Amino acid sequence: LGGSISRALQQMSNATIIDEKVLSDCLNEISRALLQADVQFEMVRDMQSNIERIVNFDDLADGHDKRRIIQQAIFNELCKMLDPGEPSFTPKKGKTSVIMFVGLQGSGKTTTCTKYAYYHQNKGWKPALVCADTFRAGAFDQLKQNATKAKIPFYGSYTESDPVKIAAEGVERFKNENCDLIIVDTSGSHKQEAALFEEMRQVSEATKPDLVIFVMDGSIGQAAFDQAQAFKQSVAVGAVIVTKMDGHAKGGGDLCAVAATKSPVIFIGTGEHMDEFEVFDVKPFVSRLLGMGDWSGFMDNIHEDVPTDQQPELLQKPAEDTFTPRLMYEQFQNILKMSPLDQVLSTLPGFSAELMPRGHEKESQAKIKHEKESQAKIKRYMTIMDSMTNAELDSTNPKLMNEARIRQIARDSGQHVRDVMDMFEEYNRLAKIWSTMKRLEINAQQLSKFH
Ligand code: GDP
Ligand code: MG
């Protein structure tokens, strides 16, 4: 999805004149990508007409940067699709909150309950798990195993068959034990669907949750809309967690669930393990979707921040065929010259994800800290490369360097072997991105020949 959308934007960027035709081509391309990703037709149509309304060519004087206005409009509309504007209930540490999880069987509820508990426990909360799934044999065992592994208190029963009773008892018990996050896992299947929704209504009535989280499998696509809506009709769904984003998720399903529940996605699951769980933030997600962490966005920043005659030529385009360590070194030099570093780094392909810690803190202090860390890392890598030979710096296959040599470089540069390895890993990552960029560039050139 991200690939096709960013290509559409790229093509628009390449156009010499931005007119209505270019805009509608671009929007059609994006709409097609969204539909292919299983976003509902109505949502796509609304997005397209909103953007067309916002970007009114009659009102735009020639001086306006139309390209930028269009990009901004697309960005905002996609953010709106993912963010209904109303933040979900946020539990407060030290104050008891009951969180009920709902979703169909297999969506990842039980796994996600534990991840959610574990995530908060690591931040100093006192979570507890209640298993109100009495329908599926083995449900309690599964939760018990997860909870034991994470050292989280749990409640459930092998013999009691009334989920409402267990849920109420569990919540009661953990309230008395002063837990501040009581998580209720529920069943996701029934002989009759209506019975499931009635059960959810009753469990909710008995436990009075502060927040109901709808858990969905990221790969179900448009089916998410009906599923989410069905749950929303029986309980007050206030947030969505999308699981299995590590798999074949097309990305459209979560948009549907957001639309159906008018609730934001708050976390995503990215694997089976307890810590494969990430806070979900709309803006960075959409940036990535749009490929804004790519060279075109990067270029915009350079044009804005650095006077033309000082623009580092290497950063203009991935012109070289192969990405050598020397090229990386020169890029690092250029990055350190620029400011604000944060802004530049966050748009350089690949950097945002790894070098910039994946925090979600918006506080400027955290930002400054990240900036310093990134800067220190770059300097460390450069120090390491200072101890490499010319041949090594110009090598197109530095991966082949042997262990003894790596140790030697570490010694010579006064850095840890681990850091040298990290530097090479970073090199490999950037080299991959570099070659992708090359391919994309070639494709764009070929495409433009046909138009
Ligand atoms: P429930 O029936 O809704 O409680 O779903 P479970 O928590 O039992 O999960 C169903 C299956 O999905 C299990 O095999 C989980 O390990 C797997 N699963 C859950 N979340 C994720 C995820 O984020 N990524 C992957 N790859 N698998 C997941
Ligand atoms: Mg379960």
Image (cartoon, grey):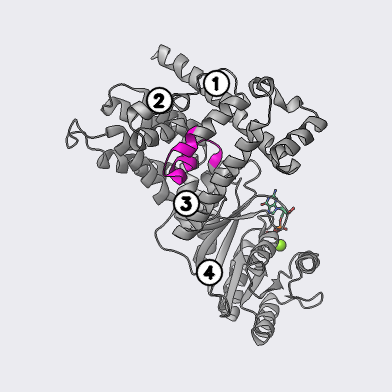
| Residue tagged 1 | 439
| Residue tagged 2 | 11
Q: Quadrant of the C terminus?
A: top left
The x, y position of residue 8, in whole percent, is: 42, 29
Q: Nearer the viewer, residue 309 or 95?
A: 309
Ligand 2 falls in which quarter? bottom right
Frontmost of labels 2 and 1 is 1
Q: Which residue type carries mark 1? A: Arg
The boundaries of the magenta stretch are 334-351
- The residue drawn where x is 30% and y is 21% is 16
Q: How far is disc 3 from disc 4 in space, using C-alphas?
A: 25 Å
| Residue tagged 4 | 235
**Callout 2–callout 1 Cβ contact below 8 Å:** no
**Callout 3–callout 2 Cβ contact below 8 Å:** no
Q: Earlier in the sequence, mark 2 or mark 1?
A: 2
| Residue tagged 3 | 282
Circle 3 crowding by C-alpha within 10 Å: few under 14, some 14–19, many from 20: some
Residue 271 relative to residue 259: left or right: right
